Structure formats: C-alpha cells, structure tokens
Image (cartoon, helix red, strand yellow):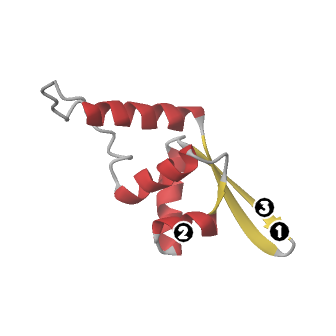
Amino acid sequence: MFQPLDPLLHSELRLAVMSLLLGAEKAEFPFIMEQTGATAGNLSVQLDKLSEAGYITIEKTFKGKRPCTTCRITPAGLKAFEDYVEALKSYLHTDK
C-alpha cells in the first residue's frame, strides 16, 4: 500500500532546502541559495511556506549593517522529512 507524499515536501526546491538543513545545525540564506541554485525571490517564497508549516524557523538579524537570514529545521520538520522518506520507500518495489 502506498503512503501519501507530503505535497509541501514534494516540491524539488523545498525538499532540497530540507535536505540541506537536515545535515546542518543552521544555514544562511546565501548558502541555501548557492547550494540549490534558486533565485532569491523563489527561495524566499519557499522558505516562507516551510516556515508557515512549522518545518523550519527563520531568524532575521544583522551582521554589522547587513541583514542576515538564518534557517533551522524544527522537530516537526525533521518528523515530516522522515515521514516523507518512509512514504517514498512505500513506492519502491524490491523483490529480494
């Protein structure tokens, strides 16, 4: 039986962001943008969607006079990612 895939995580960019944050305690906006190849506008929209779902937190501070946006995965985001991976596994057929 197939498990439903979380539509929020099924987006390529949002899945890439979650994957990056899974392996890091936190990541700054320029790093995420560089690693994903996303435009600033698109990344900002996708981060807002993940934040609204409670999957990540976004902290906006300053480094000197420059704005600094830092993202972290939340426990709810970690659980959602783990559930997504398990759901993907339900679609794989192994005849061993």
Vertical placement of 28 versus 92: above or below? Answer: below
Of callouts 2 and 3, which one flags the residue occurring earlier in the amino acid sequence?
2
Instruction: Report, in whole angstroms, how far the alpha carbon at label 3 lies from the one at label 1.
Output: 7 Å
Look at label 1 and name its amino acid: Lys
Vertical placement of 38 versus 59: above or below? Answer: below
The image's mark for residue 33 is 2
Residue 19: give x, y in percent of width and height.
48, 49
- Would you name the residue on which mark 3 appears? 61
Helix, strand or loop at disc 3?
A: strand
Report the side of 62 relative to 59 (left or right).
right
Q: Residue at x 49, y 42 (%)?
A: 53
Rendered-image quadrant of the C terminus? top left
Look at label 3 and name its amino acid: Thr
The image's mark for residue 2 is none
Q: Residue at x 54, y 68 (%)?
A: 33
Q: Nearer the viewer, residue 79 or 23?
A: 23
Q: Are discs 3 and 1 less than 8 Å apart at CB?
A: yes
Name the front one of labels 3 and 1. 1
- Would you name the residue on which mark 1 appears? 63
Residue positioned most to the right = 64
User: Badge 2: how crowded within 10 Å, few (<14), some, or many (20+)?
Assistant: some
